[in-house]
Image (spheres, coloured by chain):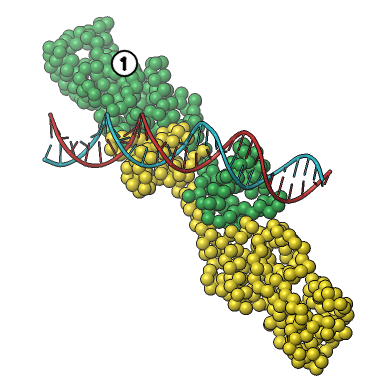
Chain colours: A green, B yellow, C cyan, D red
DNA sequence: TCCGCATCCAAGCGTCGCTTATGCTCGAAC
DNA sequence: GTTCGAGCATAAGCGACGCTTGGATGCGGA
């Protein structure tokens, strides 16, 4: 097995024509060079250098090795540089999966900051709801999954094998049509909306809604359910019902004909970024996580 | 510094998807693979593998390294094979320098045998007399020099720094024209030719002739001198004088009009093959030396 | 003939890398 | 639910490798 280290020394010897000069160039002692060349000749099975008096010449086999050394060492340094570029955030790719309301608020902010700090890193964004996004993460189809969970109702240990980076707590707010009796109330109890028609969000949010209402002593009459939050806002604005939905989800929606009210008891969902333990050590992934955290802090 | 050995292991891990399987393939233990991968990740500065449950996947940096590993390892094995071909006499080149009478007798026999035994080795042949041939050897312009020396008259230690492979002892024979009084003598003393005209050979042989004659008590009258031995034979055959010359030199010459006689005292020149100590270890050079020795033994 | 330069050689020592042995986790089968 | 097998990580021990230091040798130039 020829070692690349030996080829590097051989090249230096061939270039300088002397063991001592090669040692100076390589920053080691002359016996080290001498020993490495002896070792290389041993693994080559034939002499590579002929020491005739003062000068040092290559044998045919030595010339062959020096010729190959150029390509091999070039390949090695190219590999090192490419890896160093990834490690140093001058290159690299992160595959991010986010739920819809996250990808319209947190993600753009974080990616803009990431682009400014490390222009070489590329981020691809795909939208998926949990648990699909977590599944993708476990299967290696993405590097970071933005997900959310409600304080209650999520199985403990669900993400125990993952790195969970909390980003922010997203409060649920009520949304009622203008003209609704409670439209101008600063805060409403959830039970006060027991008689209204409801418009629910995504399946997990709908389940959460049902749980909260049940605790308040009633079962909501759900007339519509859609995971398209702008559509929810539109339905409420059209007077078709009331809704509770995450603050983040309506941040980028103009609530035309609808009014937001605080609801009691206060309910929050926790928005987190998930990744695999090993991926958290990857520089580009870590940097993206940091920018997501920073974007959440600014929100 | 990324080591080729690590890349080989990484490639095996990527191919098999498991440390244990890679260890089996590489013929070592699983902890060895584990440690090598940890070392490689250390020198790369970023994770290369993600261990998620059962399966093992590559990170982007890992993919980069595996991609480069193909070229680097291919280059290494190509270099190893080419050197092994030289070491194993399936390739290689020997530059041979010979004096003229050697190149017409010993050399063809040896090279034919070498070609038969190792068809891959190529030999180039150039003619030069010593000391020019020895000079070429020292300057790296050839690998083997065929030379000769007389038992007396050569400086001791002249070739002390060289490898001297004795090939054969070449006896000097006398050559007289047909019709010469001694043409039918089985053996003649050199002094009996004191009154004849002489035809000398190459400068060194001429010097040797003068020395021998001086010891016999006379100075030869040299009418012609040429290093072209067939010409010497021709001159003697034309009755222009007598000569002593190496047996080998006339072996391939038809002595037309001349007769060979043994001379007393017997004089021999020693034909040797010279090479540099390091070159003697080169397989193709060593094989050529061996074939020269064998050819000399058959002569 | 002396001196400088370069290589080789031997000894000492630190480090590296492999192996063996052990613990742990995960996934599958019963 | 429990057991079993496979695979990875870690620690200890040990052998070998490779570097450095110091000295000897040899060649070439002044």
| Vertical order, C4 against A41 (above or below) | above
Count the labels in the image.
Answer: 1
Q: Which residue is mark 1?
A: A169
| Vertical order, A100 against A62 (above or below) | above
User: Is A227 displayed left or right of C2 in the figure?
Assistant: left
User: Is B41 displayed left or right of B143 in the figure?
Assistant: left
| Vertical order, B278 against B173 (above or below) | above
Q: What residue is drawn where x is 15% and y is 17%?
A: A220
| Residue B100 sits in quarter | bottom right
**Residue in the foreground of this view, choosing between A270 and B299:** B299
**x, y (%) of residue B20?**
32, 42
User: Is B4 displayed left or right of B292 in the figure?
Assistant: left
**Residue in the foreground of this view, choosing between A272 and D17:** D17
**Residue in the foreground of this view, choosing between A261 and B274:** B274
The answer for which chain carries disc 1 is A
Asked whether residue A99 appears in the rendered view, the answer is: no
| Vertical order, B234 against A299 (above or below) | below
**x, y (%) of residue B224?**
85, 80
**x, y (%) of residue A166?**
33, 19
| Residue A20 sits in quarter | top right
Asked whether residue B196 appears in the rendered view, the answer is: yes
Dot 1, how many residues are within 10 Å of its Cα: few (below 14), some (14-19), or many (20+)? many
Q: What residue is drawn where x is 75% and y is 67%?
A: B130
| Quadrant of the drawing holding the C terminus of chain A | top left
Question: Which residue extends farthest bottom?
Answer: B179
Q: What residue is drawn where x is 51% and y is 62%?
A: B88
User: Is B258 displayed left or right of B197 in the figure?
Assistant: left
**x, y (%) of residue B127?**
71, 70
Q: What residue is drawn where x is 62% and y is 74%?
A: B296
Secondary structure beneath label 1: strand
């Amino acid at each position: 097995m020829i070692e690349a280290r030996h080829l590097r020394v051989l090249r230096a010897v061939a270039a300088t024509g002397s063991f001592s000069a090669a040692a100076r160039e390589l920053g080691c002692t002359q016996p080290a060079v001498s020993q490495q060349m002896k070792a290389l000749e041993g693994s080559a099975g034939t002499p590579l250098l002929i020491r005739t008096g003062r000068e040092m010449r290559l044998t045919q086999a030595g010339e062959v090795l020096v010729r190959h050394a150029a390509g091999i060492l070039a390949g090695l340094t190219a590999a090192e540089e490419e890896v160093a570029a990834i490690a140093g955030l001058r290159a690299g790719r992160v595959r991010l999966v986010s739920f819809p309301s996250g990808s319209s608020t947190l993600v753009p902010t974080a990616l803009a900051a990431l682009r400014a700090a490390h222009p070489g890193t590329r981020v691809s964004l795909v939208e998926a709801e949990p648990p699909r996004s977590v599944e993708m993460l476990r299967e290696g189809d993405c590097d970071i999954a933005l997900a959310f969970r409600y304080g209650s109702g999520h199985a403990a240990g669900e993400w125990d094998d993952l790195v969970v980076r909390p980003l922010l707590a997203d409060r649920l707010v009520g949304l009622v049509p203008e003209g609704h009796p409670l439209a101008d109330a600063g805060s409403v109890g959830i039970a006060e909306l027991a008689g209204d028609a409801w418009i629910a969000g995504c399946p997990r949010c709908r389940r959460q809604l049902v749980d909260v209402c049940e605790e308040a002593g009633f079962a909501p009459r759900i007339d519509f359910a859609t995971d398209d939050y702008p559509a929810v806002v539109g339905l409420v604005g059209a007077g078709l019902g009331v809704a509770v939905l995450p603050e983040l989800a309506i941040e980028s929606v103009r609530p035309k004909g609808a009014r937001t009210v605080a609801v009691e008891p206060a309910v929050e969902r926790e928005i987190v970024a998930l990744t695999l333990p090993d991926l958290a050590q990857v520089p580009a992934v870590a940097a993206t996580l940091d920018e997501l955290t920073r974007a959440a802090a600014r929100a």
